[in-house]
Image (cartoon, rainbow, N blue to C red):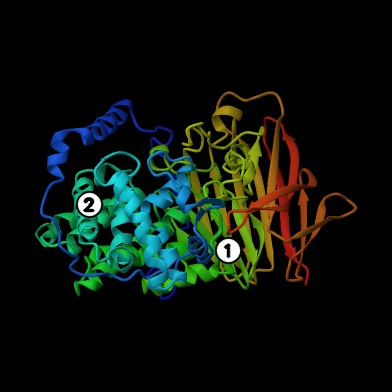
Amino acid sequence: MSDPSEPGNDGIDEGKRLIRLGGDKGLSLSERLAERLHRLTWRTPIHGLKLKGRHPLKLIAVPDDPFLGDVKRGHALLEGNLSFRGEIRPIDAINLSKPDYSRALGDHVQSFAWLRDLSTVATRAQATPIAEGLMRRWLDVHADTVSEPAWRADLWGRRILFWTAHAPLVLSSTDLVYRSRLLNTLARGARHIDRGAEKMAPGAPRIAALCGVVAAGLLIAGGDARRSSTEAALIKALSASVFDDGGSVARSPHAQLDIIMLLTMLREVYDSRRLEPPAALLEVLNRMVPALLGVCHGDKGLSSWQGGGPVSGETLRQIIDATGVRARPLRQARDWGYQRLAAGPAVLIMDAAPPPVARLVEGGCASTLAFEFSDGPHRLVVNCGGARAAVAQLPAALADGLRTTAAHSTLIVGDSNSTAIHPDGTLGRGVAEVELARQESDAGSRIEASHDGYARRFGFIHRRQLVLTGNGRELRGEDLLLPEGKRRKTVTTAFAIRFHLGQGVQASPTADGMAALLRMPGGALWQYRCRGGTLTIEDSLWIDAEGRPQSTYQLVITGESPAGGSSVNWAFKRAN
């Protein structure tokens, strides 16, 4: 085993077993009833009394927003439109009391994240009328009525961060009644989520809520007295939301990025007060950045996992620079579950863990043992991705299909998902255990991993072996179906191994039908060859960084396995 203390070594484990405990169980009936009762208390006079307190006259400080917004969305706001993931609505037509738009756009509006987009493209004189106009409308509908989704704890947390960071756009009015109402509403919102933040699901929702609680305490007079208790609650939430290796419990790179940005915004709040953030907060941030970099390709952009699409290298660079964390990509995130192989210009990222547990994430994917593979700035093998990041115009059935095992570059048995996908968006039974072995040498890197997602239904363990040569010019693989359990099936079982190709990769079959020549957008040629099944080239799609579906191709190996199991060998080799 490698020594973790050596420079540049993140401690590669030779063997690991990951188990998904209670992974297929969502919230229990008692937990759902408790949530419902908690929301019902919002309408009671007692809850209203709890929200009363001193009316703040001003903010103690105004923190910076360290991140750039989306330029296209910002220009749309200047033109009088709110846009998000392909959905565009005129600002004047936005009905905050009876929303007729998607939940994604609704959360974007309610969080006030659009203030970042607006401030990125507009001067203060241009932006203030737009920001203040939408703020007045929001206050008229939601300031005095505690209801969902507007008063959901995670949305209030984000709202506090954005209201305070962009205070010059929403608090520069000479209308003292408006200013007083906004500040009082902010204080009431902070008191509201102070009692409900820890009821949010671990991960980004709970952290967003508690970042808002801590920020409000630092920026509103009288909050310093409770600083230690609110910081303790945030640190507790971080320990429940982030693995020791720095990965988020939702196993989503997008959730990872979200938490990193939330913590960085909160650090700016401390800076605005010239205070030191808790050491535990900074320590978590220092762990999360290397883990995020570990799932980035040669183009420095994010790979596509757990419903998220790619994020461009340029966007990521700006975000990482803002964190101030300088780190190298983590090669092995043991609990988060992503393995990174890098040699020469090649990068391979593999999902080597069970999927996230049902109660932690909606829209999770059945992607165990899938991988993505890139050659320099170009992606050769990808997952379709984007189930939770696609444009609104994408049909719901297609978005749901992006979560399936078949939408990932891995083996599928019986045209079935390795982990069940429920209609409510959660993941059910399937992969409960993943065994992993990894070896490193000068000749290359080797991963051998297996999962039990098909054992109960089909009687097979799926084992995948990957070897990346030391120069990064060849990737060899073997997919095996190994018999498992006492009840052996006597019939053959159909299987397919899919390799979704990156955007712009052209595939040409060879005459023998067992190989293909792959031409990359940059001109590089890769040879692909397989043995143990029938190779075809089929249409596929890939969700790009804008959330738009792009037409691509996929290599598909099909076959039938007898009860005793089967083996398929394949290889990608650079030809020039």
Q: Is residue 293 left or right of residue 546?
A: left
Q: Where is residue 474 shown, x and y percent of the image?
A: 69, 64
| Residue placed most toward the observer, 345 or 268 | 268
Q: Nearer the viewer, mark 2 or mark 1?
A: 2
Q: Is residue 180 left or right of residue 497?
A: left
To which quarter of the image does residue 263 belong?
Answer: bottom left
Q: Is residue 299 above or below residue 107?
A: below
Q: Where is residue 231 shown, x and y percent of the image?
A: 19, 58
Mark 2 burial class by Cα count in 10 Å: few <14, some 14-19, many 20+: some
Q: Earlier in the sequence, mark 2 or mark 1?
A: 2
Can you see residue 283?
no
Quarter of the figure with the N terminus? bottom left
Label 2 residue SS = helix
Label 1 residue SS = strand
| Residue placed most toward the observer, 463 or 408 | 408
Q: Is residue 334 above or below residue 413?
A: below
Q: Is residue 146 left or right of residue 365?
A: left
| Residue placed most toward the observer, 287 or 53 | 53
Q: Which residue is mark 2?
A: 185
Mark 1 burial class by Cα count in 10 Å: few <14, some 14-19, many 20+: many
Q: Which residue is mark 1?
A: 445
Q: Is residue 349 left or right of residue 553?
A: left
Q: Residue furthest front?
A: 175
Q: Where is residue 268 shown, x and y percent of the image?
A: 29, 69
- Give, as a three-letter code, the residue at label 1: Ser
